[in-house]
Image: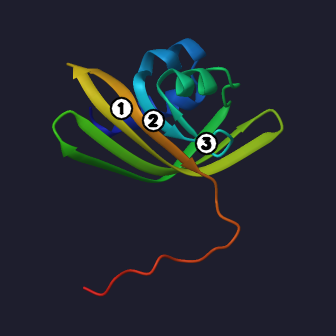
C-alpha cells in the first residue's frame, strides 16, 4: 500500500460509516483509547468505536510510516478532529497487516490525548 493510500485508509476509520469501520478492523485488534475501559480487544474495540459518531473534519500532521516487514505497516501521527461543536486531538499509532493482495486490516490502534504538561523526551547520547 503506498503512502497516499495509507493515509486515506486511516482517515476513513475516523470519518467512514460504522459498517466501513467494522470491515477494516480485525477481530484480533488491540486498542488503547483515552476512556474507560481503556484497553480493548477484538470485538470490544470494534463495537466501542463503531458505535461512536463519525468525525466530520479530520486533519493529520506529523505523520510517519514504517514498513518493518512485508505485509506489516505501522503509522504514527497527530490528529485534530471535529464534529458539531466538539473537537478532539491526540497522538496515535495504528498497525495494519495484509491479509491478501490489497486487503488490509487494522490489528492495533492507540490514542493519547496531549498531556497536561509539555515536557520533552530526553534522547540518549549516541
Q: Is residue 117 above or below residue 30?
A: below
Q: Residue at x 61, y 42 (%)?
A: 38
**Res 30 label:** 2
- Quadrant (top left, top right, bottom left, bottom right) of the N terminus: top left
Q: Position of residue 44 (x, y in %)?
A: 56, 25
Q: Position of residue 70 (x, y in %)?
A: 16, 37
Tell me what residue is drawn at x 67 percent, y 31 percent. Answer: 55
Residue furthest toward the bottom?
A: 125
Image quarter of the C terminus: bottom left
Residue tagged 3:
38
Q: Which residue is mark 1?
A: 5
Residue at coordinates 32% horizontally, 24% vertically from top-left? 104
Report x, y in % for residue 61: 51, 52
Could you tell whether 114 is left or right of 27 in the image? right
Q: Position of residue 110 (x, y in %)?
A: 51, 44
Image color mode = rainbow
Q: Mark 3 or 1, which is nearer the eye?
A: 3
Q: Are marks 1 and 2 in contact (CB under 8 Å)?
A: no
SS state under label 3: loop
Where residue 95 sits, quadrant-wise, is top left
**Which of the 4 image quadrants contains residue 81?**
top right
Amino acid at each position: 500500500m503506498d503512502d497516499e493510500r495509507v493515509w486515506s485508509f486511516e482517515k476513513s476509520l475516523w470519518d467512514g460509516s460504522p459498517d466501513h469501520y467494522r470491515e477494516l478492523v480485525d477481530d484480533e485488534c488491540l486498542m488503547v483509547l483515552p476512556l474507560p475501559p481503556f484497553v480493548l480487544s477484538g470485538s470490544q474495540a470494534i463495537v466501542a468505536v463503531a458505535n461512536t459518531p463519525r468525525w466530520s473534519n479530520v486533519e493529520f500532521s506529523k505523520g510517519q510510516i514504517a514498513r518493518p516487514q512485508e505485509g506489516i505497516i505501522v503509522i504514527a501521527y497527530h490528529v485534530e478532529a471535529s464534529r458539531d461543536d466538539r473537537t478532539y486531538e491526540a497522538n496515535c499509532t495504528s498497525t495494519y497487516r495484509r491479509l491478501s493482495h490489497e486487503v488490509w486490516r487494522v490489528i492495533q490502534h492507540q490514542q493519547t490525548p496531549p498531556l497536561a504538561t509539555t515536557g520533552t523526551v530526553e534522547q540518549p547520547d549516541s
